[in-house]
Image: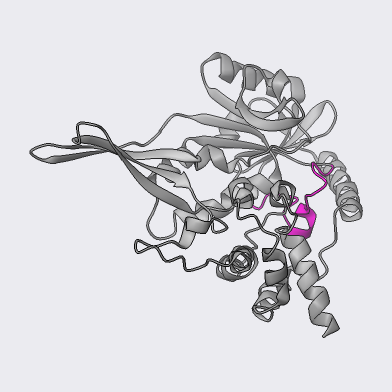
């Protein structure tokens, strides 16, 4: 992985040039008392630190609503896929969101390759930024080994005052940065190492502790399938699905057809769906196979820290903390759940 030192002014000028040439650049921007990803008019709008965006960067490559195809039914059936292909730069992405996209890359390209996701991903340039202090009181990325991106980025920036320390993750990133700066020296590497050591100490001090070992979470959950935690927390759940909507790694969706009044034309779209919602397991005859809210909470937790953890070797919770922030009754936070189950299991 190549490493460069680039003057901030030069880097931001290059991105502003991309904007002026018509390239769409999306980054976190401040909106009243919160932050959201938004198309930039200038890099002066970029929010480099907290507060954390309400929705994750997932929405850029896997939108809440997305048209999949249009169709026409006359003498023959004609189907036209709707696949977006426009180039896009995603700037200022935090490591938890980069890791979320990295996990989605595995899911959407595993067996039945999702061409809509893949096309967006191929046309996306991800420029991440290192978090040098927690961006949210609810976050626990350090506990999920997600304070640094595993992969999936094109460039990754570390603030060094007047300069960015830039790590290259792809040939696309290399082409964007190679002419702007110089190769990082050993002194630069030592300085970054010191910055990250101080960062780790700060995160370890300020973020909530995960009592069990991260690698033990799948086993802990499997041994506590019938824990009263699920019933107790589930009794407080509103079933609103907010936790699913803000999560950077939830990828379930519903497919809907919209037929026009002439009954000859229509479109098929997918919309985000979530396992905490009542209709998620409803079948055509009306039965709901996971009606109990505690069972839904258990299923969501097991997906993050058991089933997919065992399959892919990493937790599907990147510790962003958005679900804990969005939950009205504060019952869904994966770290709190793991700690409570761990505490009860040790007291038995």
The answer to whether residue 60 is visible is yes
The residue furthest left is 75
The residue furthest top is 20
What's the colour scheme?
A: one colour
- Image-based side of 193 in relation to 126, left or right: right
Magenta-colored stretch includes residue 238:
no
- Image-based side of 5 in relation to 276, left or right: right
Q: Quadrant of residue 268?
A: top left
| Image vertical order of residue 342 relative to residue 297, above or below | below
Q: Position of residue 9 (x, y in %)?
A: 75, 20
Q: Position of residue 317 (x, y in %)?
A: 66, 57
Q: Main secondary structure of the magenta part?
A: loop
Q: Which residues are magenta?
A: 133-150
Q: Position of residue 181 (x, y in %)?
A: 71, 28
Residue at the location (62% across, 17% down)?
41
Residue at the location (81% across, 77% down)?
344
Residue at the location (52% across, 36% down)?
124
- Identify which residue, 48 or 155, lies in the foreground: 48
Q: Quadrant of residue 70?
A: top left
- Identify which residue, 22 or 252, lies in the foreground: 252
Residue at the location (57% across, 30% down)?
89
- Identify which residue, 96 or 11, lies in the foreground: 96
Q: Considering the image in quadrants, where does the C terminus appear?
A: bottom right
């Amino acid at each position: 992985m190549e490493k460069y030192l680039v003057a901030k002014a030069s880097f931001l000028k290059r991105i502003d040039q991309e904007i002026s040439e018509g390239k769409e650049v999306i980054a976190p921007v401040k909106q009243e008392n919160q932050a959201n990803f938004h198309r930039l008019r200038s890099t002066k709008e970029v929010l480099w630190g907290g507060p954390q965006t309400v929705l994750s960067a997932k929405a850029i490559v896997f939108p809440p609503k997305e048209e999949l195809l249009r169709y026409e039914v006359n003498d023959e059936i004609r189907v036209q896929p709707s696949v977006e292909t426009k180039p896009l730069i995603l700037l200022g992405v935090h490591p938890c969101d980069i890791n979320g996209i990295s996990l989605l890359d595995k899911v959407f390209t595993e067996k039945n390759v999702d061409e809509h996701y893949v096309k967006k991903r191929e046309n996306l340039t991800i420029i991440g930024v290192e978090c040098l202090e927690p961006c949210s009181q609810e976050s626990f990325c350090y506990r999920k080994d997600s304070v640094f991106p595993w992969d999936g980025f094109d460039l990754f920036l570390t603030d060094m005052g007047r300069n960015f320390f830039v790590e290259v993750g792809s040939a696309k990133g290399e082409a964007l940065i190679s002419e702007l700066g110089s190769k990082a020296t050993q002194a630069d590497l030592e300085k970054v190492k010191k910055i990250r050591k101080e960062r780790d100490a700060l995160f370890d001090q300020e973020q909530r502790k995960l009592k069990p070992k991260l690698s033990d979470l799948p086993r802990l959950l499997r041994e506590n399938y019938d824990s009263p935690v699920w019933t107790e927390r589930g009794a407080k759940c509103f079933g609103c699905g907010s936790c699913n909507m803000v999560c950077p790694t939830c990828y379930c969706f519903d497919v809907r057809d919209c037929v026009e009044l002439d009954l000859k034309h229509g479109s098929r779209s997918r919309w985000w769906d979530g396992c905490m919602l009542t209709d998620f397991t409803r079948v055509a005859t009306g039965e709901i196979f996971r009606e109990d809210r505690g069972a839904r909470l258990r299923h969501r937790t097991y997906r993050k820290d058991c089933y997919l953890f065992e399959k892919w070797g990493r937790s599907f919770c990147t510790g962003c903390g958005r679900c804990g922030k969005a939950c009205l009754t504060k019952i869904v936070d994966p770290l709190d759940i793991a700690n409570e189950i761990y505490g009860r299991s040790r007291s038995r």
